[in-house]
Amino acid sequence: MDDSKKMGALPDDEDLSKIVQAFKVFGDNTRIKILWSLADEQLCVYDIARAVGMSQSAVSHQLRILRQARLVKVRREGKNNYYSLDDEHIQRIIEQVVIHVREE
């Protein structure tokens, strides 16, 4: 393997556990749809629900999981909460997986 592609030492058990948890959160169609809808703009629960074709309560439940995993963040403006990806890494992870699955 090319030295520039080596990942280094195996992560410790605590980091491994966090990595596994992150992949579990990513491993859900609904959560991927929500993350995808937040890739380009901040949205409120109503707009996310409309974009992914789900009820607001179902979306709120998934957003809670995504927030706990630090994949999305929330910004309060008046009575409304606006959600966005926590940082650019989240979008890059999704983009890289899309590239991978579309390869022949």
Image (cartoon, rainbow, N blue to C red):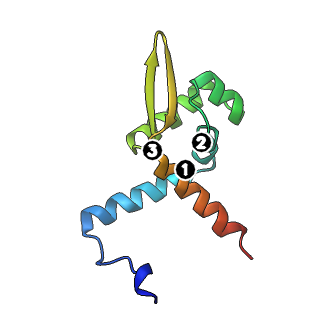
Residue 18 percent coordinates (x, y)? 34, 58
| Mark 2 crowdedness (10 Å alpha carbons): few <14, some 14-19, many ≥20 | some
Mark 2 residue element:
loop
Q: For marks 2 and 1, give the CA distance.
A: 6 Å
Marks 2 and 1: CB-CB under 8 Å?
Answer: yes
What residue did someone put label 3 on? 87
| Mark 3 crowdedness (10 Å alpha carbons): few <14, some 14-19, many ≥20 | few
- What's the residue at 44%, 79% (across, down)? 5
Q: Earlier in the sequence, mark 2 or mark 3?
A: 2
What residue did someone put label 2 on? 39
Residue 68 bears which disc, if any?
none
- What's the residue at 43%, 55% (across, down)? 22
Q: For marks 1 and 3, give the CA distance.
A: 8 Å
In the image, 37 versus 22, the foreground residue is 37
What residue did someone put label 1 on? 91
Residue 27 percent coordinates (x, y)? 55, 56
> Which residue type does callout 1 highlight?
Gln
Marks 1 and 3: CB-CB under 8 Å?
Answer: no
